[in-house]
Amino acid sequence: MASWMKEQAARAKNIQVTAEDKEKALDAQPVPPRTAPGQLMQLQATAERQRKEIADLKVQLDRGARAKRPISKLHEVPGRRRKLTAEQYAELKANLAKYPLVHPVILEAREDGEWNINAGNNRVAIYRDLGIEEIDSIVSEMEPDQAERLAFFSNLFAPSLSDYEKYWHFQRLQETADALTQQELAAAVGLSESHVSKIFAFDGLPAEAKVALEERPDRLGADAAAQLSRAHSEGRTREVINAVERLVKEERYTQKEAVSSVQAKPATKPPPAETLVVKHGKRNYCEITTRGGVIGVRLKVEAERANEWAKEIQALIESKLKQ
């Protein structure tokens, strides 16, 4: 899968060429293009080849041996199961308890005579919950990397797939595809760079927050994740973890509230300066102000005595300290 992804990332672009050009490119062996027209033709042909490959994989599924197989011999492969919310899982369970399975689950044979589940992990899990011992299935003859690839794209573009699960798939794909850049990854899976970049906002979350999200990945979208990640980078890590954990546990707690809870609090304004007035007869002799630990004396009359009064104030403070 790594080599396929690297090749796809290097070549896939959205370009226009003629049908004849695409037909020729599909039959040709991939070679490094030397001219701009040749490069455009080969990149578009790569996208055509990908669509043809996925169609061929589906044909292989249709030709698979369909039969009821014991659930006790079916095994889940990490990364192939789509995470459902409790509500989605309950709805699917209620449906499967009442109606027969419409689409068989897809399996791949193991060396021990049992099977790995390629597609349909949730259906198998529900059948286990219901105590049903067998499930309608097809055994595919795909190579392991082909099965992994089809499962990846099947999950990636599922309508109910959460942003965090997309991130998890992208991250896993990056790790297995020789450290693809986000730009290369976007080209490989046919999404815009901005969309992929947005999904990778989850990268900036604390590890504890990511662990919490595995339980309910649907609770946090990429936009809110970006703001929480920013708060984490600014040192409000504990607040971010608390916000995510609360999102997972409390259905009524919203993403907006979570983001608000980690925002930097505005600086507290100092209290307004207090002004004391000393009168001499009916006139204001001086004003005394205090602000942030500073005491100021402003003489309204007899300004020439400022130094004298400063020494008087000094003497007063010293006498107070000696008491």
Image: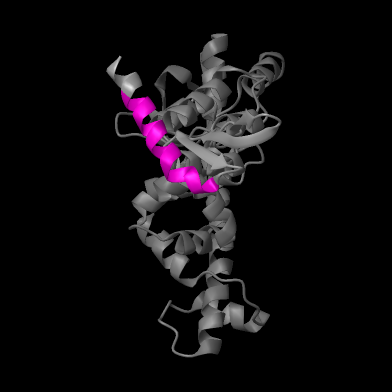
- In magenta, the rendered stretch is 303-318
Q: Does 159 sit left or right of 156 as displayed?
A: right
Q: Nearer the viewer, residue 24 or 279?
A: 279
Identified at 42% across, 17% down, the residue is 72
| Secondary structure, magenta segment, majority class | helix
Is the residue 44 above or below the residue 228 in the image? below
For the N terminus, the image quarter is bottom left
- Give residue 14's position: percent from left, percent from top: 61, 71
| Res. 104 in view | no
- Give residue 69's position: percent from left, percent from top: 49, 23
Query: Does the magenta run of residues contain 317?
Result: yes
For the C terminus, the image quarter is top left
Identified at 60% across, 78% down, the residue is 22
Q: Nearer the viewer, residue 203 or 41?
A: 203
The colour style of the image is: one colour
| Res. 43 in view | yes
Q: Nearer the viewer, residue 205 or 85?
A: 205
Q: Does 265 sit left or right of 309 as displayed?
A: right
Identified at 56% across, 71% down, the residue is 13
- Give residue 307's position: percent from left, percent from top: 42, 44
Query: Does the magenta run of residues contain 124?
Result: no
Q: Does 97 sit left or right of 62 as displayed?
A: right
Residue projecting furthest to the bottom: 35
Q: How many marks?
A: 0
Is the residue 277 above or below the residue 175 in the image? above
- Give residue 33's position: percent from left, percent from top: 45, 84
